[in-house]
Structure formats: C-alpha cells, structure tokens
Image (spheres, rainbow, N blue to C red):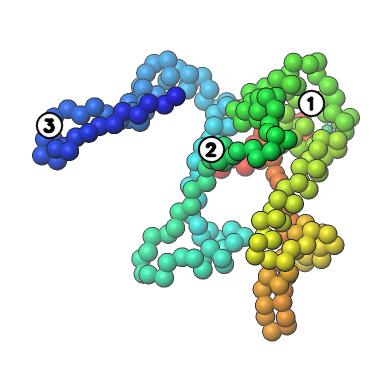
C-alpha cells in the first residue's frame, strides 16, 4: 500500500525558510538514487535483460508528427494552426492498461499461472511453467523452448502465434465497427500484393468514388526468438 504524505503549508510563499516535509515522491527518488543498497542493485542489473525490460515498460514520450509515422497526415491535421505552437507530445505507458482491466465474466479472468507468466515475461525473469520442467523441443523441431519464452512467443508453428494474431484482428475490427463498415473476410489485396486483415469500406472519398483502407495487422515481439542465426536469439528487435 502506498501512503501519501500531504503537506499543508498555506503560508509557504511568505515563510520560505520554514522547513517543509518533502513529498513522498521526492523522498523515494532520493533513496533510490543515493542509498547504497539501491545503487548496488542498479549497478548489478545495468545492461541486463531486466534493465532492458524495465525501459521497454516505462513511459515513452513520442512527438506526434514525425516523418516516418504511418499516420503523419492524420497527426499533422490535428496540430495547432497557431504560429510557434509547441509540437504535440504523446505519452505511451505500456503497462497503463493494468490499472483499467476488470474481468466482466468469470471465463475472462486470468488464472494465477497466466499472471505469473505475464509478470515473469514483463520483468525478464524465467517463466516458471517452462523452467520448472526439463527443457523441451518446440513443435517446429528446430529450437528448444527457452525459459525466458523468446522462442515460444515468436515461433509460428504450434505456438499459438497465429491464433493470437487472429484474436487481435477481431478486437481491432470491433473497435472500427463503431464508425466504419468493416470486413475481415475476403479482404481486397493492397498494393503490396499482400493479403490484408481488415478492410474499412469507403475510408476516403475522391472523384473516382469511395476508396477502402486495408490494414495488415502485424505483431512484432520485442526480441528475436526464431532465427537461423542463434547468436541473435533473445536480442532486442528495436534498441531505440
Ligand atoms: Zn519453434
């Protein structure tokens, strides 16, 4: 449980010299950055998988309009028209959803072992349901299932990756159904000759008539797990 120390000091402006109890946030910050045991712990995990996992889970700051964004036109349209207006900054908190989830039905609730697997993966620790048993070969017969779960999360034979992709496609399609006519079957091919996952009918309208938008949903795991080059297994996909 977190306890918050509330400082009531209505006269702080006039009594600048009067000592004030620092906020809990400040005290925690001071302890974490200066107390020896925490500094040792930080040094021990520097450049480790856990440190990388922590930075992946921490809040990320993203400038709304960048050249390589697929939504650059849409994002630019939302920018302020005032001169010298500061660029909009978006914040992404990867673990933020944990504060929002509620299971509505009993069959939606996660079992204790799924929670355990989720947190072990998030922290970069070995996954108990894998590491407790002798190492097994994956269904693809090319790799062993590693206790950190990199291979099992990325292998596309018998690992459930396709099932997870199709589930995610259904969820994204449902989100668009409130505003668009959406198709997930017999989706027309996009320019790249790649079969898309979701088609939004009449996304744009021009002289030639309505133009659909085809989305191809791709989920990239944060680490390599399926590769002919074993030396890069477990390395980060994106190091920025
Ligand atoms: Zn495999």
Label 2 or label 1, whichever lies nearer to me, is 2
Label 3 or label 1, whichever lies nearer to me, is 3
Label 2 or label 3, whichever lies nearer to me, is 2
Label 2 or label 3, whichever comes before in sequence order: 3
When asked about the image quadrant of residue 31, the answer is top left
* Residue 132 x/y as whole percent: 74, 15
Circle 3 packing at 10 Å, graded few (<14), some (14-19), many (20+), is few
Q: Which numbered disc covers residue 145?
A: 1
The reply to whether discs 3 and 1 touch (Cβ–Cβ < 8 Å) is no
Whole-Å distance between the Cαs marked 3 and 1? 62 Å
Is residue 95 visible to us here?
Answer: no
When asked about the image quadrant of residue 147, the answer is top right
Relative to residue 114, is residue 43 drawn left or right?
Answer: left
As rendered, which of 92 and 72 lies closer to the eye?
Answer: 92
Residue named by callout 2: 99
Which residue is pictured at 71% across the width and 72% down the height?
Answer: 202
Asked if ligand 1 lies within 8 A of label 1, the reply is yes
When asked about the image quadrant of residue 84, the answer is bottom left
Asked if ligand 1 lies within 8 A of label 2, the reply is no
**Location of the C terminus (image quadrant):** top right
* Residue 99 x/y as whole percent: 53, 38
Decide: is 127 above or below 178: above
Circle 2 packing at 10 Å, graded few (<14), some (14-19), many (20+), is few
Which residue is pictured at 70% across the width and 24% down the height?
Answer: 113
Residue named by callout 3: 17
């Amino acid at each position: 449980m977190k306890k918050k120390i509330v400082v009531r000091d209505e006269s702080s402006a006039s009594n600048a010299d009067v000592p004030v109890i620092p906020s809990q946030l400040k005290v925690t910050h001071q302890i974490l950055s200066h107390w020896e045991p925490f500094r040792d712990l930080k040094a021990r995990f520097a450049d480790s998988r856990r440190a990388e996992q922590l930075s992946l889970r921490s809040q990320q700051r993203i400038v709304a309009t960048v050249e390589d964004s697929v939504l650059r036109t849409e994002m630019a349209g939302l920018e302020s028209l005032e001169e010298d207006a500061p660029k909009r900054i978006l914040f992404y908190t990867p673990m933020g959803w944990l504060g929002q989830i509620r299971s509505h039905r009993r069959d939606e609730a996660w079992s204790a072992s799924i929670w355990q697997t989720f947190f072990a993966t998030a922290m970069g620790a070995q996954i108990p349901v894998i590491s407790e048993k002798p190492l097994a070969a994956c269904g693809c017969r090319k790799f062993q299932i590693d206790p950190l779960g990199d291979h099992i999360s990325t292998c596309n034979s018998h690992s459930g990756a396709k099932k997870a992709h199709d589930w995610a496609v259904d969820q994204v399609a449902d989100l668009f159904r409130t505003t668009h006519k959406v198709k997930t079957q017999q989706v027309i091919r996009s320019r790249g000759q790649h079969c898309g996952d979701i088609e939004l009918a009449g996304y744009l309208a021009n002289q030639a008539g309505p133009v659909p938008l085809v989305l191809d949903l791709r989920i990239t795991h944060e680490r390599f797990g399926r590769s002919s080059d074993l030396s890069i297994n477990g390395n980060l996909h994106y190091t920025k």
